[in-house]
Image: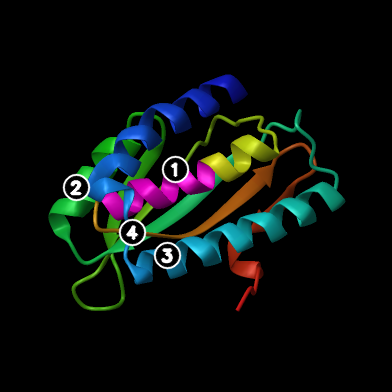
């Protein structure tokens, strides 16, 4: 399964990064920097708590957007490898896109972990959405690690 995750990241990231000449705006740079810092801190915490490259874990994630067409496009792209659904956000004019790998899990190493976060950022931006939060659940240990618990600012 970890090889599938790596292939998905490579296949989808290449054309997404090529859009707009690979350039991102300052907001996207700020969000990307924050998410990658969260990913780094989360990886350290997960390792400290016993997560290994052979841990089979479920990934849950959330995007938000105010672009209905982008939401539909994002859900379509996500549905190729994840279960994804949309709902109206509490804030007027916004939607939430929630997804998961459940009931399946993935094994991943550090490189694949960061690649997945980069992929989700790129996929979100290319569909006018923001990759906002994610969590990792290990059903064997019953531990959950969430990006929402990380403060990098």
Spatial CA span between label 2 and label 4: 22 Å
Q: Which residue is mark 4?
A: 24
Q: Give the number of the disc on residue 29.
A: 3
Q: Position of residue 125 (x, y in %)?
A: 31, 55
Q: Quadrant of the C terminus?
A: bottom right
| Mark 4 residue element | loop
Q: Nearer the viewer, mark 2 or mark 3?
A: 3
Spatial CA span between label 3 and label 4: 6 Å
Q: Earlier in the sequence, mark 3 or mark 4?
A: 4
Where does the magenta region start and end? 116-126
- Residue at 69% across, 31% down: 56
Decide whether residue 119 is among the magenta residues. yes
Q: Which residue is mark 2?
A: 72
Spatial CA span between label 2 and label 1: 18 Å
Horizontal side of 152 relative to 103 (left or right) equals right
Count neighbours of disc 1 (C-alpha within 10 A) and say few if under 14, some if 14 to 19, many if 20 or more: many
Q: Earlier in the sequence, mark 1 or mark 3?
A: 3
Front residue of 48/111: it is 111
Q: Nearer the viewer, mark 2 or mark 1?
A: 1
Q: On screen, 132 above or below 19?
A: below
Q: On screen, 42 above or below 89?
A: above
| Mark 2 residue element | helix
Q: Which residue is mark 1?
A: 119
Spatial CA span between label 4 and label 1: 14 Å
Spatial CA span between label 1 and label 3: 14 Å
Q: Residue furthest front?
A: 21
């Amino acid at each position: 399964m970890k090889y599938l995750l790596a292939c998905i990241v490579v296949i989808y990231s290449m054309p997404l990064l090529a859009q707009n000449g690979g350039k991102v705006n300052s907001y996207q740079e700020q969000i990307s920097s924050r998410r990658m810092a969260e990913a780094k801190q989360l990886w350290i915490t997960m390792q400290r708590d016993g997560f290994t490259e052979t841990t089979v874990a479920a990934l849950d994630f959330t995007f938000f957007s105010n672009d209905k067409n982008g939401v539909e496009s994002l859900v379509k792209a996500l549905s190729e490898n994840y279960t994804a659904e949309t709902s109206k956000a509490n804030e007027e004019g916004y939607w939430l896109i929630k997804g998961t790998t459940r009931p399946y899990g993935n094994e991943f190493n550090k490189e694949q972990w960061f690649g997945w976060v980069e992929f989700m950022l790129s996929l979100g931006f290319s569909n006018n959405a923001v990759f906002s939060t994610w969590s990792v659940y290990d059903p064997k240990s019953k531990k959950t690690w969430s990006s929402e618990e990380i403060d990098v600012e």
